[in-house]
Image (cartoon, rainbow, N blue to C red):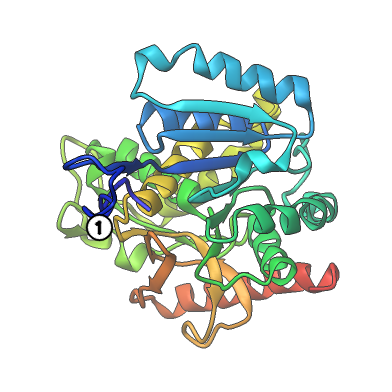
Amino acid sequence: MSEQILESRDSDDPSASVGATHRRTSKLAIVGAGAVGSTMAYAALMRGAARNVALFDINKAKVEAEALDLGHGIQFMSMAEVVGSDDIAVCADADVVVFTAGAKQKPGQTRVDLAEATIGLVKKVLPSLVEVAPNAVYVMVTNPVDVVTYASLKISGLPPSQMFGSGTVLDSSRLRYLIAKHTGVAVQNVHAYIAGEHGDSGLPLWSSASIGAIPLLEWQGIEGEGPLTHSVRDEIAREVVESAYRIIEGKGATNYAVALAGSRIIEAIIKDERRVLPVSSLLTDFYGISDVCLSVPTIVGSSGVLDRLPVPMSVDELSGLRASAQAVRDVARRFGF
């Protein structure tokens, strides 16, 4: 899916010029031109993740305006083409489809509260999307992402490797940010994951986390900053879960960090990076957990989900992951999946 130079025509073809090549560029389609979708398009363009970006939304005036606004800034970023339309055909032949459309989370609402309306929207839109972009890798971002991803797999009939959710990529970024803030090291040198649900039952995998090459649980601190005690870790974990609610309360939506997290997933697919990301995918006998979409460290490349990493977990972490799986499964069953 990354940019490819396709072979030139056979030299016996009289219309072929010597050394002629045809360049195929990557195409990203984003479903939903709201705060998350439009910001994700912006982030992907700024990072040079895709050369063609298509925005689809049922609000024709809104989606066309977002595409025009983005297009006006192309001079200041990597060369790309941006189009917006209320016609699903704009997504045709996409390499990656990111689904951000869904009910907006209001202050006080949990992600689960959004499930019914969002699944109803998926049922209306997804079959047509798969028809025009059957070979795309689908990344579900709309909440509750684990339940929506599971329902989308059932609705679409796509293989589990080809469709997955953004999962806890954002949660893990929040976790690393808070660890870095407490320890005084660069966030890029913090390696830690939130596993399980993208929601209240998600849990940090402390036992496999590290700062540089030092296991996080053995970190003694620098420059006056002490170790990450049990109480500090509990406070960080609580802040990871509650931060989204605080942002929604203050500004109405989360959009910047989730867009950057989504653009990182897009790059991993388009550039076939085989990057380890905690995305939400359909698990089959992962530590005995099956038939649920849940986030665990996963290798992501051009064909989507490649493999899940059996990261070491403590007894409590494994118990927490199983409880999270059951919580997500219970919600999915509530909606008939």
Residue drawn where x is 62% and y is 70% of the image: 158
Label 1 crowd (10 A; few <14 / some 14-19 / many >=20): some
Please tell me whether mark 1 sits on a helix, a strand or a loop: strand
| Residue 141 visible to the viewer | yes
Percent coordinates x, y for residue 290 in the rendering? 58, 83
Q: Is residue 300 left or right of residue 97?
A: left
| Residue 227 visible to the viewer | no
The answer to which image quadrant residue 306 occupies is bottom left
Q: Is residue 80 left or right of residue 168?
A: left
Image vertical order of residue 79 relative to residue 164, above or below: above
| Front-most of residues 129 and 334 | 129
Q: How many marks?
A: 1
| Front-most of residues 71 and 321 | 71
Q: Quadrant of the C terminus?
A: bottom right
Percent coordinates x, y for residue 254 in the rendering? 60, 33
Residue drawn where x is 59% and y is 40% of the image: 30
The residue at which mark 1 appears reads as: 210
The answer to which image quadrant residue 23 occupies is top left
Q: Amino acid at mark 1?
A: Ser
Image vertical order of residue 306 relative to residue 213, above or below: below
Percent coordinates x, y for residue 38 in the rendering? 59, 28
